[in-house]
């Protein structure tokens, strides 16, 4: 397999581990937004985060939550953010992002240029009509078991 995360798990590629058990590995992100960014991954190669079994997903979140507390306590970011975006490496990963400003987690759809600078604002995002929100809500919740 050519997955960089699987190679890290196998010890074939160096990493800076934060936490490890039989099912989960947490390590420093090589390309962080800010100091202290950590990736928490299942040791089993699973492409999509939504395909992780619920018990393992719960454990990943619990470990990430505990790690985020320690990051906040030691590195003192303004906020702690979490993301699962699925791009970059096709191995499910939960990202812990120490935030120093509101744009540390954002979306290109929020970008605009104001006074010669790129800014990110939700003002760029259109308000979706309630009827459309209700339609999509029904599509999602139809058959949802929680």
Image (tube, rainbow, N blue to C red):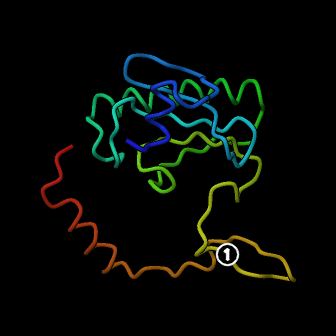
Marker count (numbered): 1
Seen at 51% across and 31% down, the residue is 8
Q: Nearer the viewer, residue 23 or 71?
A: 23
* Direction top: furthest residue: 21
Q: Nearer the viewer, residue 138 or 75?
A: 75
What residue occupies the far right of the structure in this picture?
115
Residue 6 drawn at (x, y percent)? 43, 35
Q: x and y percent of residue 42 in the render?
A: 39, 32
Q: Which residue is mark 1?
A: 111
Percent across and percent down for residue 105 are: 63, 56
Horizontal relation, residue 121 to residue 53: left or right: right
Residue 112 drawn at (x, y percent): 71, 80
Q: Is residue 43 above or below residue 112?
A: above
Instruction: Give the residue displayed 63% in from the left and 43% down from the top.
Output: 97
Q: With 6 as the anchor, is 57 left or right in this view? A: left
Dividing the picture into quadrants, the one containing residue 76 is top right
Question: Dot 1 lies on which element?
Answer: strand
Describe residue 14's horizontal placement relative to residue 64 as left or right.
right
Residue in view at x 70 percent, y 35 percent? 36
In the visual, does 41 lie left or right of 110? left
Label 1 neighbour load within 10 Å: few <14, some 14-19, many 20+: some
Q: In the current view of this chain or complex, which residue is farthest to the left?
A: 143
Question: Quarter holding the N terminus?
Answer: top left
Q: Quadrant of residue 43?
A: top left
Q: Quadrant of the C terminus?
A: top left
Looking at the image, which residue is at 67% across and 75% down? 111
């Amino acid at each position: 397999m050519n997955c960089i995360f699987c190679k890290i798990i196998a010890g074939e590629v160096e990493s800076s581990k934060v936490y490890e058990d039989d099912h989960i590995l947490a390590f420093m992100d090589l390309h962080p937004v800010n100091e202290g960014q950590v990736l928490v991954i299942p040791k089993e190669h699973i492409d999509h985060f939504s395909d992780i079994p619920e018990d393992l997903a719960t454990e990943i979140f619990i470990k990430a939550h505990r790690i985020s507390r320690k990051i906040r306590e030691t590195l003192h970011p303004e906020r702690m953010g979490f993301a699962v975006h699925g791009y970059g490496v096709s191995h499910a990963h939960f990202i812990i992002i120490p935030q120093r400003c509101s744009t540390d987690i954002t979306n290109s759809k929020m970008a605009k240029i104001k006074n010669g600078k790129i800014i990110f604002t939700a003002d760029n995002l259109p308000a979706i009509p309630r009827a459309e929100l209700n339609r999509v809500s029904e599509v999602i919740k139809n058959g949802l078991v929680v």
